[in-house]
Image (tube, rainbow, N blue to C red):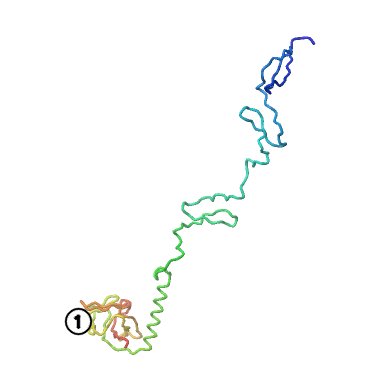
Amino acid sequence: MSGNFRLFRGFINRKGEKCVVNGSGDGTGAPDFNKADKVQNATNGNLAALNENGNLEDSGKKPSDFAEAEHTHEEYVEKPENVSPGHIAFFGADGKLVDQGKHANSFASQSHTHSIGSINGLQEILNSLTEQVLELRAQQVTWTDLERITIGDTGTGGQNRYDAYGLMNLINYANVAVGDTIRIVGISTSNVSVVGVVEQKSVCPNRVYTSIDLSALAQGNYMLQKAS
């Protein structure tokens, strides 16, 4: 062979280091730290990893141990969109979370009560039943005339003054007690018979409050009666 060239070959020194010598075969050389050690007993298909010295080692992981960059998780639920803080979530037909549109305070506790006024329509039903009971009772009791009253006259000239629920200056004031069933029967106004109860009495001036809306009665003469 002619020309200028250098032949390098390698060997392992006593320290187990990879070395190269020049073509003179003088046995001198330094470890080749630019080459990585070959992994011994590596598992076929495993990914290689670098150790702290820069040499290769078996990572213990295969490509199949990792998910694709774009993937989903069946054990997780996607976050709902367009939600309001504090709203309760529920599961839709597809298993995803949906904003229910209600807060926790939109619901009553398992143990709770209702007042009559809070139940829609119940107060009206009770009032209607009360009127029916009073009408039925009116058909079964004896009525005693107390005195004649005039609706529509607020003067004091021998007539009774009134407001929506109360009669004032009754001559027979003492003969009416709270809880009494009373009736106002039309004299000049025919076919009028309204039944109610005495709810309250006051002394000065003497006033009898009733469950009857007196302002709903037409102007005219009536007889105030009490059930006996």
Name the foreground residue: 172 vs 164: 172
- Residue at 65%, 28% in the rendered image: 55
Quadrant of res 177? bottom left
- Residue at 65%, 32% in the rendered image: 49
Q: Is residue 69 left or right of residue 165?
A: right
Asked which secondary structure carries label 1, the reply is loop
Quadrant of res 179? bottom left
Name the foreground residue: 178 vs 123: 178
Name the residue carrying label 1: 157
Q: Is residue 159 left or right of residue 65?
A: left
- Residue 166 is situated, as x and y percent measured from the top left of the image, at 27, 77
Quarter containing the N terminus: top right
Name the foreground residue: 158 vs 78: 78
- Residue 116 is situated, as x and y percent measured from the top left of the image, at 40, 71
Name the foreground residue: 53 vs 131: 53
Quadrant of res 54? top right
Image vertical order of residue 112 relative to residue 82, above or below: below
Number of numbered labels in the structure image: 1
Image vertical order of residue 26 relative to residue 174, above or below: above
Local packing at callout 1 (Cα closer than 10 Å; few below 14, some 14-19, many 20+) is: few
Q: Which residue sits furthest bottom? A: 142
Q: Which residue sits furthest right? A: 1
- Residue at 68%, 27% in the rendered image: 37
Q: Which residue sits furthest front? A: 14
Could you tell me the amino acid type at mark 1?
Gly
